[in-house]
Image: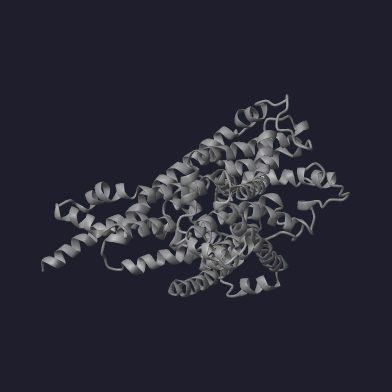
Amino acid sequence: MGTPKTIKKVLLTIMMLVFSGMILYPFIWMFASSFKPLAEVYEFPMKLISKNMSLNNLKEVLFEQTPSFMLYFKNTTITTVVSVVGTLFTSSMAGYAFAKMRFKGRNQLFLIYLITMMVPFQVLMVPQFILFKYVHIFNTLWALILPRVFSPLSTFLMRQFFVDIPNSIIEAGRIDGAKETTIFWKLVLPLAKPAMATIVILNFVWRWNEYEAPLIFLTDKKLYTLTVGLTNFIDEAGVAMDNLIIAGAMVALIPMLIIFLIGQKYMIEGLTAGSVKG
Amino acid sequence: MGQTKKKKKINWTAWLFIGPNYIGFIVFILIPVVFSLIVSFTDFNIFKGLSGMRFVGFDNIKEMFSDVWFTSAVKNNLLFILGTIPVLIMVSMVVATILNNKVYLKNTMRAIVFLPYISSVVAISVVWMKLYNPSKGQINQLLMWFGMDNPPSWLASTTWALPALMLVGIWMGLGYNIVVYMAGLQTIDRALYESAQIDGANGVQMFRHITVPMLSSTTFFLMITNIIGSFQTFGTVNIMTDGGPGKASTVIAQYIYVAGFRYHKMGYAAAMAWVLLIFIFCITLFQWKLQKRYENNF
């Protein structure tokens, strides 16, 4: 009974290892190549280890290019952190109000939210471009941060979570004479940690990897984020610097990979949240 | 009397809670959406500015039908959807079923297949560009090693550019689809498999007659999500081929960007973006309708 089952399990495991190896291959190639000199980047079959490996490529893109990837890294971090914290703040407050407070026009306002959730960025980019020029935040990091602080999707997710919190908790707080703001901060928000983690994960990944908005709203190279910084570097470097380009890609990728390695279980759950119901 | 007073007080707090979010939402999303609809009926151009804006009625819509770049973009986008989604759905369903309970290292492999999904599209596109290099790339060197004399030049070829982008799209989307399917599989009652096993059904039969039908609502959800995502494909195309060679791999989102920000025809770009929105709106509406039917069935 046990043996054929184990053999089957081993065979299926090998099959899946081959499959995940194929998925992983581009990452492995990138990782190895980013330490190699240009001459070895295109070797086939690829060597995982070579004696000519060094940190030269990374040093070059991180510090010696102008603007350097270190600067892009800083810009990306600022944009991501500020917009994620902002989204968390506004979406949890509004989500709570939509779920647990009564006021005139609540359902209508929420319906507008739901409808705009499906609006793609392509619809927003022309009017936002004009708006940002008009209020003079075009070509500043604010153009990336501000519109992302008000996220219908995050508000929607927070509302869905708060709806499930029992009213008795809030009622108990009200009977004790606590102010609505105190109830929210002291009673409700601590319960919402899982939902808040989801919001942080979703928005962090999206903002860190965002490409089209910085492509459109930034013209000053010193303000570039990692994504546009990298594409700009490709245009300027040309094919003779493929090893540096790959090292640049690695710099753009590695922070997210490290965060994913640490919290992969939560990240996978967060990024697929709301996709399967029951 | 006392009740109205209480109601009024709660009202005020609610607005305080919603206020910051809703004001930002109105300024950065709602007004732009409305404004974009207005712009789509004009010939707005950055150089002429808002004062030079002229209403052109339905001219932008008419232009789309005669613009071969736009019709090619729509055609390529549909090909992209047809070429990626069936593969994504089928491969993900099979892989999820295998990963779910029949292998060692389940969580490690789940994490590996999910990696492309969290990765920067730009970084990924850069790596794939180098893998697709016609003479030196890993892919063609492998094909030549297998004895193929003239492997395709991938991104530089009018025939192969779009399929090459589709492959990257599949590679990027697999992780999400697999994880969602794995979650869907958890909801299937084990008793179904046990009784089928007693009746002498083999693994393939159980997959066909239990797993596939029981996952149908997940499949439906994934198809909708994938279609909406595919209609917004931008990063890979913009970086790897820029829509080329010629029109070979241009897609809707890429052409909207090119029209608006390279040719500065912002009115036209806005009109095309609205067409895209209408596509997405119809698909979502269809999803809501069918989802209701699914929910009633359970």
Q: Which of B22 and A171 lies nearest the eye of the viewer? A: A171
Residue A136 visible: no
**Location of the N terminus of chain B (image quadrant):** bottom left
Depicted B248 relative to depicted B64: above or below = above
In the image, residue B51 above or below residue A236: below
Q: Quadrant of residue A250?
A: top right
Measuring 65% from the left and 55% from the top, which residue is drawn there? Answer: B170
Q: What colouring style does the render use?
A: one colour
Classify the position of the C terminus of chain B by image quarter. Answer: bottom left
Provide residue B110's location: percent of width, then percent of height. Answer: 56, 48
| Percent position of residue A224, x then y | 57, 41
The answer to whether B126 appears left or right of B2 in the picture is right
Q: Which residue sits at x=68%, y=42%?
A: A25
Determine the image quadrant of residue B56: bottom right
Q: How many marks?
A: 0
Of all residues, the one furthest to the right in this rendering is: B149
Q: Is residue A214 left or right of residue B12?
A: right
Q: Residue furthest toward the front?
A: A1
Residue B249 position, x and y percent, is: 72, 59
Q: Can residue B84 be seen in this snapshot?
A: yes
Residue B54 in the image: above or below residue A77: below
**Percent of width and height locating residue B157:** 80, 55
* Front residue of A138 and A209: A209
Image side of residue A20 versus residue B145, left or right: left
